[in-house]
């Protein structure tokens, strides 16, 4: 994650372990590997070394929106699940539904970063962002979530890079505006 610039762009401390992220079709995320928006369009399975009696937060962001050279929307929120028991993501509370990668044409590679945090306590929120909404997804800051919810350092993480492909217009058509994430 150091080589990818995740530190210091998003977080200050390297996660303790690598989270296992697998998309449908057995597409595996490997640190910094390039994947296509088509490969990552559906929600992945994410696992990590977890204590079954603890709660976790899973966060996925793009720090390179709309481009790595001009990240004026840093960070774009792609997925947020809180109160995950152990590493059973499907049993957690979805705050922001998963959306795949949608880098604008000609903006090069974007980093898509998964971070897992062990929670000190249950997090209470009624916020919910649907997959068709950009509201609440742009200019989010991982460091703000860490501070607000006392998440501490990430215990696991992973990331891939992606650039525009022919799936991006389909992804963008689900939003009410034509912004890219």
Image: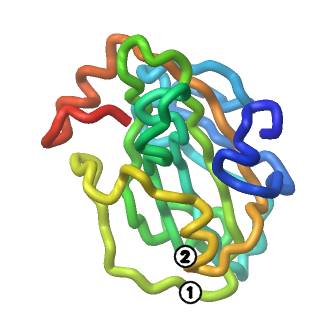
Left or right for 35, reference 116: left
Identify the residue shown where x is 55% and y is 20%: 109
* Extreme residue toward the left, this view: 176
Above or below, comparing residue 26 to residue 105 in the picture:
below
Q: Are marks 1 and 2 in contact (CB under 8 Å)?
A: yes
Q: In what quadrant of the picture does the N terminus appear? A: top right
Q: How many C-alpha atoms fall within 10 Å of the one at disc 1: few (<14), some, or many (≥20)? A: few
Which residue is more in the foreground, 153 or 118?
Answer: 153
Q: Is residue 45 left or right of residue 106?
A: right
Q: Is residue 40 left or right of residue 128?
A: right
The label on residue 122 is 1
Residue 62 percent across, percent down from the top left: 51, 40
Earlier-in-chain disc, 1 versus 2: 2
Please give the name of the residue rendered at 64% of the width and 50% of the height, measured from the top-left corner: 10
Q: Which mark is residue 53?
A: none
- Work out whether 117 lies above or below 126: above
Q: Identify the element where label 1 is drawn.
A: loop
Q: Is residue 1 left or right of residue 105?
A: right
The quarter of the image holding the C terminus is: top left
Looking at the picture, how far across and down is residue 104, in whole percent? 36, 22
Task: Judge whether 163 appears above or below 116 on screen.
Answer: above
Residue 84 % position (x, y):
57, 71
Residue at mark 1 to residue at mark 2: CA–CA distance:
6 Å
Q: Which residue is mark 2?
A: 83
Position of 89 relative to 93 (above/below):
above
Corner quadrant of residue 15? bottom right
At x 44%, y 35%, the residue is: 65
């Amino acid at each position: 994650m150091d080589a990818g610039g995740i530190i210091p762009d998003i977080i200050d401390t390297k996660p303790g372990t690598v989270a296992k992220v697998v998309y449908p079709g057995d597409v595996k995320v490997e640190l910094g590997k390039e994947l296509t928006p088509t490969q990552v369009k559906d929600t992945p399975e994410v696992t990590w070394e977890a204590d079954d009696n603890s709660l976790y937060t899973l966060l996925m962001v793009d720090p390179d929106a709309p481009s790595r050279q001009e990240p004026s929307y840093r960070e774009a929120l792609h997925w947020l699940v809180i109160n995950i028991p152990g590493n059973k993501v499907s049993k957690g509370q979805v705050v922001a539904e998963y959306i795949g990668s949608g880098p604008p044409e000609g903006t090069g590679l974007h980093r898509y970063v998964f971070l897992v945090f062990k929670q000190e306590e249950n997090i209470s929120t009624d916020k919910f962002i649907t997959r068709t909404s950009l509201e609440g997804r742009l200019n989010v800051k991982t460091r703000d979530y860490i501070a607000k919810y006392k998440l501490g350092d990430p215990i696991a993480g992973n990331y891939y890079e992606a650039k525009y492909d022919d799936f991006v217009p389909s992804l963008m058509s689900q939003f009410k505006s034509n912004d890219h994430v």
